[in-house]
Amino acid sequence: MAEIYLTIAGTNYYHGHKFIEPKMEVKLVKEPDNKVDPEAIKVEMPGIGLIGYVANSPYTVIGESMSAGRIYDKIGDTAKGTVLYVLPKGVLCILHAEDIVGVDKE
C-alpha cells in the first residue's frame, strides 16, 4: 500500500503550531459523535492533548495528503502519525503503516 499523508489543520484554535517539529509523533482519534463532521479525526500530542484535526476540506488539505473522510475507514479508532513538515497552511504528517487497516504487520 502506498504511503498515506495527512494534514493537521486548525492548530490556531488550540495551541498554534510553533512548537510542532518534524519527527514528532501525533495520535489520531476518530470522533464519530462530532456534530459538525461525523468523519472528524482529532489530533493529539502527549502532555498537550488536542492540537487540531485531520483536514477534511479541499481548502485545507495540503498537496498529496488525504482528507479525514478518505482515511477514516483505513484506520481503527486510533492511529499514529509522524510530522514531516510544518507549513504556513498546516502540518503535513505521514500515517504509520502499522495503523493502516489491511496492511501486513510483518
Image (cartoon, rainbow, N blue to C red):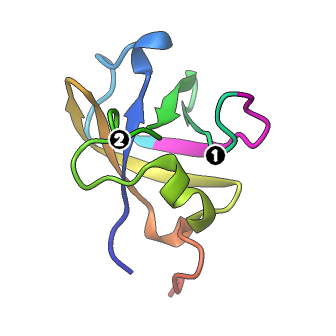
The reply to whether the C-beta atoms of the residues labelled 2 and 1 are less than 8 Å apart is no
Give the residue displayed 44% in from the left and 22% down from the top.
Answer: 10
Q: Secondary structure at mark 1?
A: loop
Residue 58, which numbered label?
2
Q: Residues within 10 Å of mark 2 (few under 14, many from 20)?
A: few
* Residue 11 position within the rendered picture, expressed as x and y whole percent measured from the top left: 42, 20
Badge 2 or badge 1: first in the primary sequence = 1
Q: Quadrant of the N terminus?
A: bottom left
Question: In this image, 37 relative to 14: left or right?
Answer: right
> What residue appears at the point 59 percent right and 74 percent down from the top-left corner?
101
Q: State the image coordinates of residue 13 (x, y, percent, origin top left).
A: 48, 12
Label 2 SS: loop
The residue stretch that appears in magenta: 26-35
Task: From this view, report whether residue 16 is shown above or below residue 79.
Answer: above
Q: Is residue 15 visible?
A: no
Up-down relation of residue 5 to residue 85 (above or below): below
Quadrant housing residue 99:
bottom right
Q: Which quadrant of the structure image shows residue 29?
A: top right
The residues tagged by marks 2 and 1 sit, at their Cα atoms, a distance apart of 15 Å
Q: State the residue lying farthest toward the front.
A: 58
At label 1, the amino acid type is Glu
**Residue 39 at least partly seen:** yes
Point out residue 24 in the picture as x, y percentages from the top left corner.
36, 40
Looking at the picture, which amino acid does disc 2 mark? Answer: Pro
In the rendered image, which residue does mark 1 sit on?
A: 39
Q: Residues within 10 Å of mark 1 (few under 14, many from 20)?
A: many
Taking the spot 44% from the left edge, 49% from the top edge, the residue there is 67
Q: Point out residue 48 in the picture as x, y percentages from the top left corner.
A: 55, 21
Q: Residue at x 52, y 82 (%)?
A: 103
Magenta includes 28?
Answer: yes
14 vs 92, left or right, is: right
